[in-house]
Amino acid sequence: MDVLTGIVDRRTSADVVFDHLYDQIVRLELLPGTKMSEIEVAKRFGLSRQPVRDAFSRLSNLGLLLQRPQRSTIVRHFSLEVIRSARFVRTAVEVEVLRNAALSRDESVDAEIDANLDRQLRVIDANDVEAFHQADYEFHALMCRSARSAFAFDAIAENKAKVDRLCMLSLTSQDAMRALYDDHREIVSGQRRNAPDAVETAIRRHLDRLTPVIAQIHAEHGDYFED
Amino acid sequence: MDVLTGIVDRRTSADVVFDHLYDQIVRLELLPGTKMSEIEVAKRFGLSRQPVRDAFSRLSNLGLLLQRPQRSTIVRHFSLEVIRSARFVRTAVEVEVLRNAALSRDESVDAEIDANLDRQLRVIDANDVEAFHQADYEFHALMCRSARSAFAFDAIAENKAKVDRLCMLSLTSQDAMRALYDDHREIVSGQRRNAPDAVETAIRRHLDRLTPVIAQIHAEHGDYFED
DNA sequence: GCAGGTATTCTAGTATGCAACAGTGCAATC
DNA sequence: GATTGCACTGTTGCATACTAGAATACCTGC
């Protein structure tokens, strides 16, 4: 969001509420369908309704809350449609980025990428899922930088927000993490061999790995979905 | 935005203000850098500051306004960086859409596409720039539907908002419109020949036509830019 | 005449109160 | 016993008032 609002702002109460709720929603501490009253949240933070209203409005813009006039506001359900759309865009952008990166990359990022891959390996051995997610996130950011398209990562991150909650439900096994890691390696390898086609195949397969996970979550937690 | 908020809501005062200001900003009736006082706008609409605040907040989220705490809010300047990013995403999504469309398309949309192309030709002859922009917009929406990826157009439209104002400054000549029309024809032709590579080349050239236009606008209206 | 500080006047952030509307439960009637 | 009407409660939308910070203009001292 800072990308849009520009200048780093003094932190306002509304910001605090926003960050807190965002975190709770994405971590699924607030489940889809949960009723959110402005008054109740205001009380909880010791504030008036106004800053809470502000925060609610922002969360609605991100698609995390559903505000219905004169009716209660609820934590938005997952939507297969929205997820599909977000993944489509993400795939499109990643493919474009990596194609660029395979044709001409910024070699000064190579060392960071190697270090990141090493770190992935370490946290997989330690079976630290949280850390792996973090490293994965950074990997894709690094690839954007490598493609001299750092800005593209904003778009990826934006779409990530719409899918992130869902990922909290996918208990990542060590094998699954290993598969993702192998994809990463293959992508980097293809990039360094200047093999755009190989990279594209790899990234598509990489992002497709989420498909069965989503189907499984939909089957297990149908009540979290609106469709 | 309806995609995010879901249900069709009763129109609120904040909605009215939002729509009105959005329109004014995109049409460049409000120029980048214009100071926007909540109080002043509220007076103009005969409302209190609250709904105006709401509208401002939404416009900030879209990157059209810049709210600075305790300082005046202004119409956001163009940013080459933001434009670059938006165009990158747009290109990525369009390429992905059209590649799909070239591989397997929904033929039931063909007739609408043909009708749209005819309309483009007519409005070019009439030199109706506004109508051409509209037809162009619809063309790309139709191509998304043809690719069975109607949802992808949301992403395109979203990014369009960031660039749309700028297009108001590009006085489109009949020749320029004709060139765009020819691109459209070539894209459709490639699609119907199942020639994804030809389509990709065409769409990239198509979207690249904006590059010199932007450079020219930047040169002529440097004061509208923040960089 | 110039520089620095202060006071004024903007701005936005927040608090509170009122109005309008949706949902719910109870009661009265059929 | 079922159904309909009504009042009540809870919700958001909007208005107003107050606070605090930032910019500016002015005034004073040099």
Image (spheres, coloured by chain):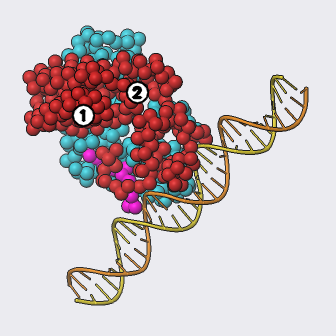
Chain colours: A cyan, B red, C yellow, D orange
SS at mark 2 in the image: loop
Left or right of B4: which side holds B79?
A: right
Res B135 label: 1
The quarter holding residue D13 reads: bottom left
Position of A210 relative to B85 (above/below)? below
Element under disc 1: helix
Q: Looking at the rendering, which quadrant does residue A193 occupy?
A: top left
Q: How crowded is mark 2: few (under 14 residues within 10 Å), some or many (20 or more)?
A: some
Q: In this view, does C26 lie above or below A137?
A: below
Point out the stretch of residues depicted in magenta. Answer: A65-79
- Against D13, residue D4 (above or below) is below
Is residue A157 shown to the viewer in this render?
no
Q: At which x and y percent is residue D15?
A: 54, 59
User: Residue type at mark 2?
Assistant: Leu
Query: Which residue is label 2 attached to?
Result: B169
Q: Give the residue displayed 27% in from the left and 20% down from the top.
A: B175
Please state the horizontal and vertical placement of residue B26, each as a whole percent of the image.
41, 36
Give the mark nearer the N terminus: 1 vs 2.
Answer: 1
Q: In this view, does B204 lie to the left or right of A111?
A: left
Q: Which residue is drawn at 46% across and 39% down?
A: B60
Q: Which amino acid does label 1 sit on?
A: Ala
Q: Disc 1 versus disc 2: distance between alpha carbons? A: 18 Å
Disc 1 crowd, CA 10 A, few/some/many (<14, 14-19, 20+): some
